[in-house]
Image (tube, rainbow, N blue to C red):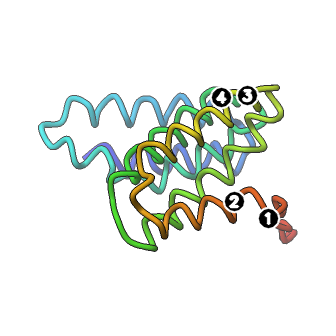
Amino acid sequence: SAEPHYGVLIEMAISDKEPAEALRWYDRLCGEKKQSPHEYSWSGHGAYADRVAEAVAQSHPERSLEIYRRKIEQHLPQTGTSAYETVAGYLRKVQPIMKALDREQDWSQWIQDIRQRYHNRPKFMEILDRLHKRPILVARKTRQ
């Protein structure tokens, strides 16, 4: 299978701080996945999606948003606290990227759409409320 091969290339590009290269291999990986008969295997390399989205947030913010958005849409239909926390975690990553792109309007609109779609999930609404109150904490990167 081509996946480990692309995985290694993606990881190498990320550690070499070559975001464009990481995206290129990620796109190749996704391209192969789309051809595969198992649509579910597409979500199987979610680990790479997260790594790539994070690695290209500065250099390719639109691509980063697109990857995160797909992950969010994938998790939204799921119910339960852990699914809601997962969505909130992704939203927390998306917010500063949209802010940097001067797209706060789109951000508010998107949150509103999500709220309207899932208004009958009180626990989820509660988690979304916390998203607004809590300042975004920048995780400290530990230097190797």
Q: Residue at x 43, y 65 (%)?
A: 83
Q: Nearer the viewer, mark 2 or mark 4?
A: 2
Q: Residue at x 33, y 49 (%)?
A: 43
Assess whether mark 4 and mark 1 are in contact (beta carbons under 8 angstroms). Answer: no
Say if 69 sits above or below 44 in the image: above
Residue 84 x, y percent position in the rendering: 48, 64
Q: Which mark is residue 20?
A: 4
Find disc 3 in the rendering and name its residue: 105
Find disc 2 in the rendering and name its residue: 131
Which of marks 1 and 3 precedes in the sequence? 3
Q: Nearer the viewer, mark 1 or mark 4?
A: 1
Q: Is residue 88 left or right of residue 132?
A: left
- Label 3 sits on what residue type? Gln
Q: Residues within 10 Å of mark 2 (few under 14, many from 20)?
A: some
Assess whether mark 1 and mark 2 are in contact (beta carbons under 8 angstroms). Answer: yes
- Label 2 sits on what residue type? Leu
Which of marks 4 and 1 precedes in the sequence? 4
- Label 4 sits on what residue type? Ala
